[in-house]
Image (tube, rainbow, N blue to C red):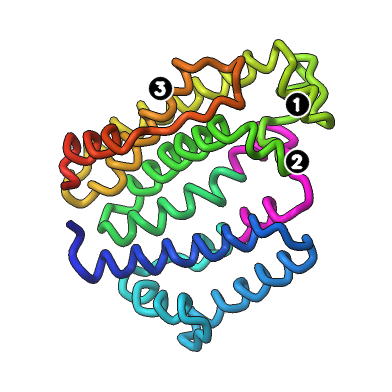
Amino acid sequence: RLPTENRQAMYAIYAFCREADDIADDPGEEEAKRFQLGQWRAEIRRIFAESARLPTAKALVQPVDRYNLPQQDFHAMIDGMEMDAGNSVRIADMAELELYCDRVACSVGRMSNQVFGIEKGLGDKIAFSLGQALQLTNILRDVAEDAERDRLYFPQDLLTAHGIDSTNIDEGLTHPRLVNVCELLAHVAKRRFAESRELLAQCDRTQMRPAIMMMEVYNAILNRLFMRGWEYLDIPVKLSKVKKLWVAFRYGIL
């Protein structure tokens, strides 16, 4: 287990991410969601001025100071949630998809690695590779669910190159060449997992146990997605409790 101070810092970071994510996923009006995210943006500035007001923000004051957490990573998370806050989501190209992954996943990795005590250069490389791997896996797993909310995270230029109209999600999800787009992004995720594994091998295993567990759980989900195939995106892919326990045991979490 992580030392108490580290664990409390991670709880606070997770609570912030959860609250921001809940705002973006709320079924409410876009204007209201953007207003709430703007309030959180102001609260982040207050955290760094040690004048936080919200309970979660107050819990972040000490970790921010103790672990020198960068203010820009908190703002990056808010930026990512603002991308999700619209009534629909479309991603223009691979560069925008990478930016989205950086905001909603890699930023959390960078903060977490500060708490874990990993050297910044190595920690940022891990955050980049693992953050992309996790978020791309999320996107591939949740295609059908996101489509119900008019969200499509596949780059529009990639869809267009395969003759797929990204404006009509229902038609896009049944297009025979969508399989090729899924396959391409899945292999990017697979490559990022391989990079993450090599980078994590350079770290103290005890320090990075949470990251290793996340990597193995999501890598197992990606493998399940490969086995299911890309023709049946509405068939959910989840890990059983037994599988999750095995991963926890195998990688020394328990």
- What crowding class fits label 3: few (fewer than 14 Cα within 10 Å), some (14-19), or many (20 or more)? some
- Mark identifier at residue 223: 3
Task: Indicate whether 191 appears above or below 50.
Answer: above
> What span is colored magenta in the figure?
78-99
Q: In this view, does 168 lie above or below 59?
A: above
Q: In percent of the image, x 61 and y 44: which residue is there?
A: 99
Indicate which disc, 1 or 3, sits on the residue closer to the N terminus.
1
Image quadrant in which you'd find residue 177? top right
Disc number at residue 18?
Answer: none
Whichever of callouts 2 and 1 sits on the residue coming sooner in the sequence is: 2
Task: Pinpoint residue 142: horizontal percent, then vertical percent.
Answer: 58, 35
Depth order, front residue of 10/235 = 235
Q: Considering only vertical position in the picture, is 61 above or below 8? A: below
- The amino acid beneath tag 1 is Asp
| Contact flag, marks 1 and 3 (Cβ < 8 Å) | no
**Hey, what amino acid is under mark 3?**
Asn
Residue with the mark numbered 2: 150
Q: Counting residues from the N terminus, which is met first, the one under dot 2 or under dot 3?
A: 2
- C-alpha separation, residue under disc 2 versus residue under disc 3: 26 Å
Q: Residue 41 location in percent, x, y?
A: 62, 72
Q: Is residue 50 above or below residue 233?
A: below
* Quadrant housing residue 196: top left
Nearest the camera: 236 or 75? 236
